[in-house]
Image (cartoon, grey):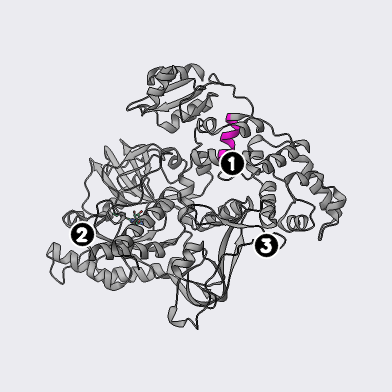
């Protein structure tokens, strides 16, 4: 057993990692309940060992540092988190504390507003004189990310507040709320992603976060996001007596608040509302995971104040998770597109929250070890809303005998593969390294043919399976040698559909370059980055010949992507497939040459501009036909310098790259467009 010091250190590392996955990458590996368990364990250890406390422990701050993808926005007032209650008792204690601090008599009502706890992503909107100035994510609570342009694509985010006689619009209004994605929107989005072979989002919350934190607002605009406002930041020029009045004012100004918010005079009323929300939960078009109870009187809120991460005047009364016990019939490894082996528990079917659950992902080997799940064990399963079910824990008392631990197979379990399985240094995942692994091949072919890629209509999953199993397709290029007769010989293929498919394959021979790059299935290169690469390099050869430095000069391409593109191009097998595709007559089409006045010019931006956000500046450059790069190099045409420039300015001077201040930049834009 590790000592408390090591355990604390390891928990902190672990929690920081999950914070990063959850907040910055929108790709959590564990569920909220699992995260809470880690967090509580760390809190307990720190409480028991005060000498080991530290101000940079994740128990002392919220979220994770914002990413560098977006401009940083400092919140005037920190965006706090909420204390969780899991039982009515916790809520009574919450009221007890309030009564003591406010010195209220036992029969004096506290007065609350009860709101659904929306399972989304917290944002802050700043309106000055009624105009939306900036919108940001919570980030680490102090500093968030500028997602103004993305928020502006949402119908529930007014660009201007509506004037109302009473109350008048404040000079400055900072309002906070939750961005959510509907369940229907979530299902549709995931279905599309699955079809394209992209990783699916674990839950609507992550899908909402992923949708909002897009570099391209056009992508955000296509997602059915909605904002419900629920709290205030700093407000100049308006005073309210109660939270209820504040919510009513927001509606007057054209902002959306949740129709299920209720004013509750006392705890009894609040508990009734909780029961009503539990009953309504499954019928709502979006997910809620509890009820937030807030002291209504704003003067009382002020007196109550806050403890380190959360206000004393509010509590989140979480819903009980939907859980059930069942038995693990077996643990098997399933192989994904990139060869990753994911251990999956095959379960005795069990109904959880109205849905029959047959298997649950165990994520990776570390998870299995941590939870110590073994074949034959009885496990507790949880499903939250539409979320893929997961194993909460093993019911150890019910373990019979000494079942064997799961071992990751050394050879790929996919029939016809048997490739070596390796665990890469520093990674949790095990991967089959046989590039010809049929499971990988099948999903890579499906991805290649999918709508966002080569868009070959009629090449469905069953057909791909057969083509691979019969050895007719061993790589992408083989698709272009299939003729209608071969296709018609497959199961369930009529002659007509074989002819159609053969036509569709032929028609895919002139794809846009970005679709072609996306279709290749290069790790980390999704549709957006494929477009970025296509715009910048303009030919397959140029992309695959670019070295890491050249790749890093492209705006939006980070070290991970640059490495991955290089790794792809450095593998002779991949290059052979690309050559075979080109030899088969596939001719990727470069994007139409930019025609604006800045065509052929590459810009690097550093420091903050006064009149434009970073995103606006980039878009203006792109619209005028120019390119934006993230680092200064020989090919940079101009460096645009705003307030507090970084090291890029020095680099520009060293390389003799022309430097533009904001005025000169605007002039150039004006001339060019
Ligand atoms: S009030 C300091 N009201 O829950 C109080 N928050 O766990 C701040 N949330 O960061 C927020 N529904 O993103 C409030 N009706 C609601 C909410 C809500 C969801 C989120 C919010 C907050 C998180 C804390």
Q: Which residues are magenta?
A: 526-536
Q: Is residue 639 magenta?
A: no
Distance of mark 3 from mark 1, alpha carbons? 25 Å
Q: Which residue is mark 3?
A: 414
Say which quarter of the image contains residue 163.
top left
- Label 2–label 1 contact, CB within 8 A: no
Q: Is residue 370 left or right of residue 300?
A: right
Quadrant location, the N terminus: bottom left
In terms of sequence position, does the residue under pointer 2 or pointer 1 come before the other?
A: 2
- Label 3–label 2 contact, CB within 8 A: no
Query: Looking at the image, which is closer to me, 484 or 114?
Result: 484
In terms of sequence position, does the residue under pointer 3 or pointer 1 come before the other?
A: 3
Distance of mark 3 from mark 2, alpha carbons? 52 Å
Ligand 1 under 8 Å from disc 2 Cβ: no
In terms of sequence position, does the residue under pointer 3 or pointer 2 come before the other?
A: 2
Q: Is residue 580 visible?
A: yes
Where is residue 488 drawn, in percent x and y? Answer: 85, 54
Crowding at dot 1, Cα within 10 Å, few <14 / some 14-19 / many 20+, comes out as: some
Where is residue 638 drawn, in percent x and y? Answer: 46, 20
Q: Is residue 179 visible?
A: no
- Circle 2 — which element? helix
Label number found at residue 567: 1
Q: Which residue is mark 2?
A: 51
Q: On the rendering, which quadrant does ligand 1 occupy? A: bottom left
């Amino acid at each position: 057993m590790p000592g408390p010091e090591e355990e604390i250190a390891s928990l902190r590392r672990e929690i920081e990692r999950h914070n990063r996955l959850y907040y910055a990458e929108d790709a959590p590996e564990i569920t909220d309940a699992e995260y809470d368990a880690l967090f509580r364990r760390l809190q307990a250890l720190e409480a028991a060992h005060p000498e080991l406390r530290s101000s940079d422990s994740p128990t002392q701050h919220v979220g994770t540092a914002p990413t560098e993808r977006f401009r940083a926005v400092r919140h005037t007032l920190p965006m706090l988190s909420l204390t969780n209650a899991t039982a009515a008792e916790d809520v009574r204690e919450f009221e007890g504390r309030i009564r003591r601090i406010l010195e209220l008599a036992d029969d004096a009502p506290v007065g609350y507003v009860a709101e659904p706890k929306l399972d989304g992503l917290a944002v802050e909107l700043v309106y000055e004189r009624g105009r939306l100035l900036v919108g940001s994510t919570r980030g680490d609570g102090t500093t968030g990310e500028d997602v103004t342009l993305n928020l502006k694509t949402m119908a529930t985010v007014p660009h201007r507040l509506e004037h109302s006689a009473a109350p008048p619009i404040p000079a400055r209004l900072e309002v906070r709320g939750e961005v959510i994605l509907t369940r229907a929107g979530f299902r549709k989005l995931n279905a599309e992603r699955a079809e394209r072979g992209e990783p699916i989002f674990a839950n609507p919350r992550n899908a909402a976060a992923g949708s909002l934190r897009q570099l391209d607002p056009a992508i955000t605009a296509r997602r059915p996001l909605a904002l419900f406002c629920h709290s205030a930041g700093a407000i100049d020029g308006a005073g309210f007596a109660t939270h209820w009045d504040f919510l009513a004012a927001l509606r007057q100004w054209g902002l959306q608040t949740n129709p299920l918010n209720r004013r509750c005079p006392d705890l009894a009323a609040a508990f009734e509302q909780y029961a009503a929300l539990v009953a309504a939960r499954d019928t709502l078009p979006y997910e809620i995971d509890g009820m937030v109870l807030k002291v209504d009187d704003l003067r009382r809120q002020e007196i109550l104040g806050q403890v380190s991460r959360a206000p004393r005047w509010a509590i989140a009364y979480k819903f009980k998770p939907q859980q059930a016990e069942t038995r693990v019939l077996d643990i098997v490894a399933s192989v994904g597109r990139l060869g990753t082996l994911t251990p999956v528990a095959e379960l005795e079917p069990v109904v959880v929250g109205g849905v029959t659950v047959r298997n649950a992902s165990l994520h990776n080997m570390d998870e299995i070890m941590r939870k110590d799940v073994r074949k034959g064990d009885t496990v507790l399963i949880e499903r939250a809303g539409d979320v893929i079910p997961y194993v909460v824990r093993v019911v150890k008392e019910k373990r019979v005998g000494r079942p064997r631990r799961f071992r990751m197979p050394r050879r790929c379990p996919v029939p016809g593969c048997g490739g070596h399985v390796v665990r890469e240094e520093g990674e949790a995942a095990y991967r089959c390294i046989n590039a010809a692994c049929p499971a990988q091949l099948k999903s890579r072919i499906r991805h290649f043919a999918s709508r966002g890629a080569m868009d070959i209509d009629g090449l469905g999953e069953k057909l791909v399976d057969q083509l691979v199993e019969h050895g007719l397709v061993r790589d992408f290029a083989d698709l272009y040698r299939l003729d209608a007769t071969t296709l018609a010989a497959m199961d369930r293929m009529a002659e007509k559909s074989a002819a159609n498919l053969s036509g569709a394959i032929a028609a895919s021979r002139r794809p846009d370059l970005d679709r072609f790059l996306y279709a290749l299935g290069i790790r980390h290169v999704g549709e957006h980055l494929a477009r970025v690469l296509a715009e910048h390099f303009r030919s397959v050869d140029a992309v695959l010949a670019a070295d890491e430095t050249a790749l890093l000069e492209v705006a939006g391409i980070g070290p991970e992507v640059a490495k991955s593109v290089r790794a792809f191009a450095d593998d002779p097998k991949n290059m052979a497939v690309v050559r075979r595709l080109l030899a088969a007559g596939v001719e990727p089409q470069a994007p139409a040459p930019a025609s604006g006045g800045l065509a052929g010019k590459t810009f690097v931006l550093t420091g903050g501009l006064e009149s434009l956000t970073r995103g606006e500046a980039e878009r203006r450059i792109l619209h005028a036909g120019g390119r934006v790069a993230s680092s200064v190099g020989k090919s940079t045409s101009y460096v645009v310098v705003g307030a507090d420039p970084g090291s890029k300015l020095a680099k520009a001077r060293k390389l003799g790259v022309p430097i533009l201040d904001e005025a000169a930049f605007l002039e150039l834009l004006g001339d060019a467009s």
